[in-house]
Amino acid sequence: MTSSPIIILTGGGTAGHVSLNQAIIPPLKNMGYDVHYIGSRDGIEKKLIEDSFPGLPYHEIRSGKLRRYFSMKNFTDPFKVGAGVLQAYRLIRKLRPELIFSKGGFVSVPVILAGRMAGIPVVIHESDVTPGLANKLAMPFADHVFTVFPETVPHVKKAEATCSGPVIRPELFEGSKEAGLRLAGLSGKRPVLLVMGGSQGSAVLNEAVRSQLPALLRTMDVIHLCGQGHLDRTLDGTEGYAQFEYVTGGLKDLLKAADGVVSRAGSNSIFEFLALRLPMLLIPLSAEKSRGDQILNARLFAKAGFAEVLEEERVTGESFLEAVGKLNSNTQRMILSMEKAEAPKTPEEMAELILRHSSSS
């Protein structure tokens, strides 16, 4: 009896570096592949993968953070990356996968370097307009890079690149408005604004929402995903307001219950909103706090008519309230623009594209 071919997935640090991997695991398994995941010990990817796919082999390696700013850890973390490369290399030599697929994040760098050392085909996926630091370092060692935005392809050096477009998890389309309203304890008699700052939360969004909560609640209900450790217990019991640290299984229901969303501008999230035809107000991370990728994402979505944009530097209580008003006024125009957008790839289609680069192809 022959054993199943093996594929290794990697990526982590944020939920956005895991969601595509979560989407393609079921079709890969249906195609007969034995899927293994390489991630960090303490990263969010460990919990997300183990909760979503109990029993799927998850291998921990060491990984240092790659920083664009000065830190004493910049002198020690390269040794962690080196240790991670050795750990990943030993594992890859043992498993002999047909392919390594990376969604990015710090933990992916040692895996990709080890894959190249072991002679295993490596495929990378980049979601943002310009490559992140981890992917930028790893791309020269990849056989192929898939991008979400066509504008990203010219940024890819020393590797073939294809714009494959976004991939949306199919379960997001299975949400129930009634279940979402029930989870949030809302009546459904008024429009619902969903505010989410990503898996780690956003102090800027949290402050803007809470400072204007009485004004917002005059005309709408608010569901607020505020991030781990950022609940405000003094607001418990406020009629029309529901706060959660982070929601996983019920997110599809909350999205279905929402009439509009306020969010950061991470690529995975905004393409999910687009696929769900959910009008959005985007408040991208400022250039001071990031490499500016979210700013580019938000501008492209605004140009396409999918979103209103409020720059983080301009956020005050008043400007936030005004931007929410514009979101409400332009809801129908945004939905019409979204309906003209190209349909996203299915996880099955993306899995097939990835496997074209395996050693058996």
Image (tube, grey):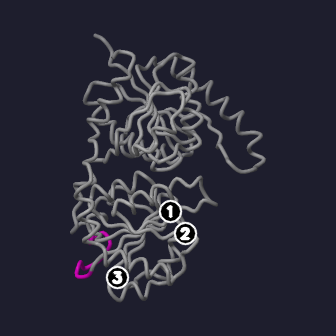
Q: Which-is-in-front pick, marks 2 and 3?
A: 2
Question: Mark 1 or 3 closer to N-term?
Answer: 3
Query: How many other residues sit within 10 Å of disc 2, few (<14), some (14-19) or many (≥20)?
Result: some
Q: Main secondary structure of the magenta part?
A: loop
Residue lying at the far top of the rendered structure: 1
x, y (%) of residue 290? 59, 55
- Tell me the SS state at disc 2: helix
Give the Cα separation between the discs numbered 2 and 3.
Answer: 26 Å
Q: Residue at x 42, y 30 (%)?
A: 36
x, y (%) of residue 359? 39, 16
Q: Nearer the viewer, residue 237 or 224?
A: 224
Give the Cα separation between the discs numbered 1 and 3.
Answer: 26 Å
- Which residue is identified by label 3? 240
Q: Nearer the viewer, residue 330 or 94?
A: 330
- Which residue is identified by label 1? 284
Is residue 65 shown left or right of residue 73? left
Query: How many other residues sit within 10 Å of disc 1, few (<14), some (14-19) or many (≥20)?
Result: many
Give the Cα separation between the discs numbered 2 and 1.
Answer: 6 Å
- Which residue is identified by label 2? 312
Magenta residues span: 181-190
Question: Mark 2 or 1 closer to N-term?
Answer: 1
Asked if marks 2 and 1 touch (Cβ < 8 Å), the reply is yes
